Image (cartoon, rainbow, N blue to C red):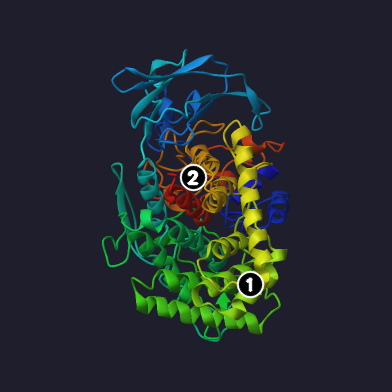
Amino acid sequence: MPPSVACRALGPVMDTMKLSFALCLLVAALPACDPGSPVEEEPQDASTSLCAEDETAVGALCVPTVTITGLPVAYNTIGFHPGREKRATLQEARDKFTVRRTDGTVAYEGKIPDPVADAHTGGQAWIADFSEFDEPGEYLFQIEGVPKEQAELMTFRIDSDVYDEPLRVAIMGLTGQRCGTEVSFEYRGDSYAHGACHLKDADPRKYAGETEESHDGKGGWHDAGDYGKYPPNGAFAAGILLTAWDHFQKRLEPMAFEIPEKDGGIPDFLDEVKWQVEWLLLMQRADGAVYHKITGDSFGGDIMPTDDTQPRYFAKISSVATADFAAVAAMSARIYKPYDAGFAGKCLDAAEAAYAFLDENPDPIDPEDKEQLQGHYNSDDADERLWAAAEMWETTGSADALADFESGVAAESPRDNWDWPDVQNLGVYTYALSRREDRDARNADTLSALETQLVTSADRIATNAEAHAYGVGYKGNPYWGINGVIVREAMNLHVGYRLTEDPRYLDAAAMQVDYVLGRNLYRRSFVTGLGHAPPLKPHHRPSIADGVRAPWPGLLIGGPWGKGALLDSTEDDGWRAWVDESSNYESNEVAINWNAALIYALAADYSE
């Protein structure tokens, strides 16, 4: 079979960035797939041949094509904050645009200046800027020559609460990833549910080398489109969410979310994160070390989680998992203390045990999990140790942890674009924004240098965003999970704002949200269930297998990159590579670390 067919057929095996790209190339060169996984043509929907010319088949239904294709103008169709930038991008030349109220009256008229370079197409784009218009309300964006059926869809709002509903839906995306429990909720008339799954997590004998037959590993969030659970990425996602709480507690504390624990004694936001932290606590051994992951021997097929009954195993321990765990457990100890002192104390004990293990084992510990095909999440552990040191110091005031951070940070400076292999930014944020007064006076230059680096990073991202055709702060070629990288840059921008109060950084942070909610080359939202024409076929097993027309809501897809989204392209199509197909794991998968970054960006305070 052609290499592209081999790689596509093994899509469930080749899940996410967690698997080496080299392995994909090797598999693509194979003459055939495993006999146990025959290649089958995707069945045609029964409605395909019955749909009208202006309709497209989605599952068993015919849907108006205009509602699932991009608009003539790229912008955040959900809306904008008063006082923040408001921009739209056109890919064809126009002289002017109009913003109308829902009653038809003109609210704003603007001219469109000369085109700018479009780095995502190699061509040109035109920017309609109406940032000075701040009147709260609901509006229509209008340009000449747009068919009526599309013009009617070009709506948006301006209001200070414009991110509230997207935030609730993005949290719903995490709730839908819960493992080890029944999940059930409704969204826009569709019901989403699965039974309690993976209740036998997991066997520590085969890979971890333990002697007990089973060890409790139930709970937590499924990591991505697959059903594996990985402490490095799981702690990273939880750490981003707890950082959001640290930065925006006033906004998040009173908010209600559609979770099973709603309206309990703990704020709903923290209750959702607690589901993940409680699972992380189960991943720790008695000596403080943390197992690297729980997975089966394969990714399995496109099935519901309750049907994934293959044996699941613990990997060996790793220093990466242990350090990420120590950081999140320390954060949890201080954040949950006002709400659940018992749980906070348990987290503190776990954090101290993990940190002590790291201190006693200064060399990297590799989990040696290559035999377990599912995601590896291996990396150098210096940045993880740095993050752990910052959180241990912030929580406990430990002089040793402070010394560990200040002696190691020079080699792990903050980055503009970062992800689970590069977690030092989280530690640097904590140190730079800390209210503690016990930072080592002898290292005053360390704090000054880090503040300068953070502000320089925010300035660089903002400058890129202001000049970019779609407001993107990231400069370079796309790679796996690029949408997560883009919204994660909002964290650098908000930290830069906290250090300087420069409103440019808030504008640029809002632009990153605009991008994933519609101001992009495709003129579509990248978040399921949100905005105009969101993804309908993410690489997400419950969305594929549950029989519901619409995919599970609130999930940010990874974003365009690679070779034509596995559609037989021989060229690297980069920003033009996205195709909304469930087999497209390269750019249409979902992952909790990307969702966490989106949640931070939506939870942020955009008022000056």
Residues under labels 2 and 1: Cα distance? 51 Å
Element class at badge 1:
helix
How many callouts does the rendering have? 2
User: Where's the C terminus, which quadrant?
Assistant: top left
Q: Give the SS element for disc 2.
A: loop
On the image, numbered disc 1 is attached to which residue? 441
Which amino acid, by three-letter code, is at mark 1?
Ala
Mark 2: which amino acid? Pro
Residue 413, how many percent across, how many down? 68, 60
Expressed as whole percent of the image width and height from the top left, the position of residue 60 reads 37, 36
Q: Measured from the top left, where is residue 350 in percent x and y?
A: 49, 80
Disc 2 crowd rating (10 Å Cα; few below 14, some 14-19, many 20+) is many
Quarter location, residue 341: bottom left
Q: Nearer the viewer, mark 2 or mark 1?
A: 1
- Is 337 on the left-hand or right-hand side of 207? left
Q: Nearer the viewer, residue 287 or 45?
A: 287
Residue with the mark numbered 2 = 538
Tell me which label, 2 or 1, sits earlier in the chain: 1
* Image height of 549 relative to 48, above or below: below
In this view, 27 is above or below 214: above
Quarter in which the N terminus is drawn? top right
Identify the mark at residue 476; answer none if there is no mark.
none
Q: Nearer the viewer, residue 510 or 238?
A: 510
